[in-house]
Amino acid sequence: MQTITLRLKLHQPTKAKQAVYRELAVRVTGLANNLVAAGRPKKLTSKTAKPYCPDRIPSAVINQALRDVAAHPKVERFRALWPGFNNQNCRLERVGDFWTASFPTHVGRVRVPLQATDRQAQLLAKLGATVKQGAAKLYEKRGRWYLALSISVQVTPCVGTKVAGVNLGLANLAVVNCEGKTLFFSGDHAAFAHRMKDKEARSGVWRRRPSQPQGDSLWVYRLRPHRARGLRGRRKHRESN
């Protein structure tokens, strides 16, 4: 089975819930740093680790924090250790049109809706059948909250007999070798598209026509005000000459 991680975005969490998530993350980080300062005591449980907890933390979150601290033996101080949950404490189920996740916090168990894509919803629908649920981690990135869910999926065995090797490099984007035949992929087209996208982002902005219904073909490209003024000034200069 192959293990992958789904990044599930929380659907419009309220400010009160966001404050609960941040407070839980601060408490878990404090627990981790206290354990590091104490020399990483071994054979701790959720009960014996209570003296290292600055505030109340659910037992399930403490157990997962102990595993995370043990998995990073070289870290001298954690900047942020996000709360984690195992497959028994993080429950996912479909409620109406949304997939929801429930997990324990210091104020009790909370349930939140998720913004799952079509591909993610298909995998979540197979939980307990062909997909096995693993640990989950709650974290914040750029003001948005996500639930990183680890799952194991069955992989269809390969029926072919040929073996190909792929090398990702700097001179070439990728080099593929299969039974003596070598293919080079320079990646020039991808780099050109990336440069053009950055150039358009710096010079203008895409906007939808307000008088037209929604549609992909109804997007128009407009220059930003300072760029438009510069073009008009150059046009008048050419006309005067």
Image (cartoon, helix red, strand yellow):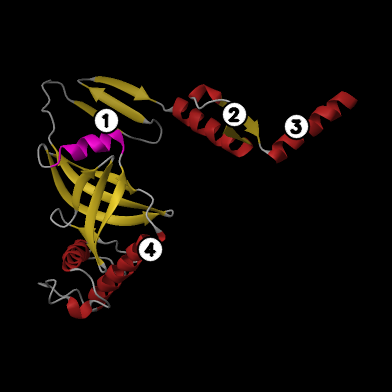
Secondary element under disc 4, as helix, strand or loop, is helix
Quick check: marks 2 and 1 in contact, CB under 8 Å? no
First in residue order: circle 3 vs circle 1: 1
Q: Nearer the viewer, mark 3 or mark 1?
A: 3
The region drawn magenta spans: 117-127
* Marks 2/1: CA–CA distance: 45 Å
Q: Which mark is residue 231?
A: 3
Q: Are marks 3 and 4 in contact (CB under 8 Å)?
A: no
Pick whichever of labels 3 and 4 is earlier in the sequence.
Answer: 4
Q: In which image quadrant can residue 219 be found?
A: top right
The mark that comes first in sequence, 2 or 3, is 2
- Give the image location of residue 162, x and y in percent: 15, 21
The image quarter containing residue 71 is bottom left
Residue shown at 22%/74% (left/top)?
35
> Which numbered disc covers residue 222?
none
Residue bearing mark 1: 166
Q: Quadrant of residue 222?
A: top right
In the image, which is nearer the foreground, mark 4 or mark 1?
4
